[in-house]
Amino acid sequence: MRILIIMLALFLLPAWADEPHKEYTSAEPFLPHVSGDDHLTGTYRYWKDPKNLDMRLAGSPDQSWKLNWKHLDYPFNKEMHAGHLALDRGLTLFNKLNRSGTFKNCLVMYRFNGPYETSLRGLRTHYPAFRTDLGRVVGLEEVIEHCAKLEGEVLQNGSYDNSAVSIYVASHSLGMPIKIDVSSGPLRESWRRGERLFHQKVGRNNMSCASCHVGRIGQSLRATVVTSPYGDVAHYPVYRDRFGITSLQVRFAQCSLDLGFNALKPGSQAYNDLEVFLTALTNGYPVSVPSERP
């Protein structure tokens, strides 16, 4: 019986868990939908409906993290902040790049890999996506860089101007739920790689993303309380008063440095895979830009 149990346990382990040259934190049974947070932290019931929050938690330093405030900045802070200035900058850049209409066409033409689209509405909710013209899974900021290059302009992935255009494009999806399909094909493969990277220990501190964003949820880390990874992607690019306008992959780079290893370039396959994984955890949660965080 003991041998049978051991064999069953080995069968249920992820395929990457027995790699002898790498260490991983314990794998969580992540669901590619924001409601999966009910299993991970049980807090989703507190923040899934912004109109009906349990505000009793807001006044408690030990409990307020359960409201997942980072996703709700835009509805609760409509005053001017640097995210709004980036939105204005994005509009200016978009109009400049789209003088002939070809920049927008490039952004939307491979949307859903289906019929030709002409609207930016809902575009943000479907990225990252597999672009047949690029032959790989890419995030929206990488597509913006690619389409700007076709217009003879440099809009580097991770730069302020690239993120500003991304915020402008995302603003056409405000309030619409993220919905990428990771059930099959290239996105499924990217999800699996991203899941592995999320759990892989790296750097001089021998930590993984999951070390904090699973193992330390609700705990204080450098004056910031760690919250759920579910729903996190909906408000990127975000204005952070310590870092300025920050895209999701720039945030990956910042975390990489915090973990004690070299950051990768935005648009690298590893960061694209992590973005797919975390975006899938945001499926069903509405886009919220421009947003602001400490």
Image: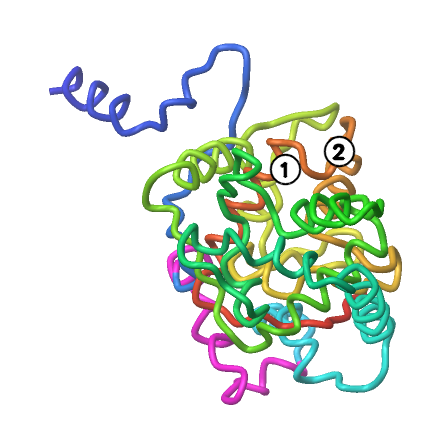
* Label 2 SS: loop
Residues marked 2 and 1 touching at CB (< 8 Å): yes
Q: Report the predominant secondary structure element of the magenta stretch.
A: helix
Q: Residue at x 64, y 81 (%)?
A: 58
Residue 89 in the figure: left or right of residue 172: right
Most extreme residue toward the front is 100
Question: Residue 271 got which mark?
Answer: 1
Residue 161 lies, with reference to residue 132, above or below; the image says below
Q: How is the image coloured?
A: rainbow
Residue 262, picture quadrant: top right
Task: Give the class, few, some or many, for how many residues have Cα within 10 Å of label 1's Cα (few <14, many ≥20).
Answer: many
Query: How far from the left and from the top, in percent, is residue 14?
Result: 36, 28
Q: Which residues are magenta?
A: 36-59
Query: How far from the left and from the top, in percent, is residue 60?
Result: 66, 78
The front one of 193 and 128 is 128
The front one of 6 and 112 is 112
Q: Which residue is mark 2?
A: 265
- Please state which amino acid type lies under the numbered disc 1: Tyr
Residue 98 lies, with reference to residue 207, above or below; the image says below
Residue 282 in the figure: left or right of residue 104: left
Question: Residue 256 got which mark?
Answer: none
Residue 260, picture quadrant: top right
Q: Residue at x 60, y 76 (%)?
A: 174
Residue 259 lies, with reference to residue 214, above or below; the image says above
Query: How far from the left and from the top, in percent, is residue 76?
Result: 69, 84
Q: Residue at x 47, y 59 (%)?
A: 116
Residue 211 lies, with reference to residue 49, above or below; the image says above
Please identify the quadrant where the C terminus is shown: bottom right
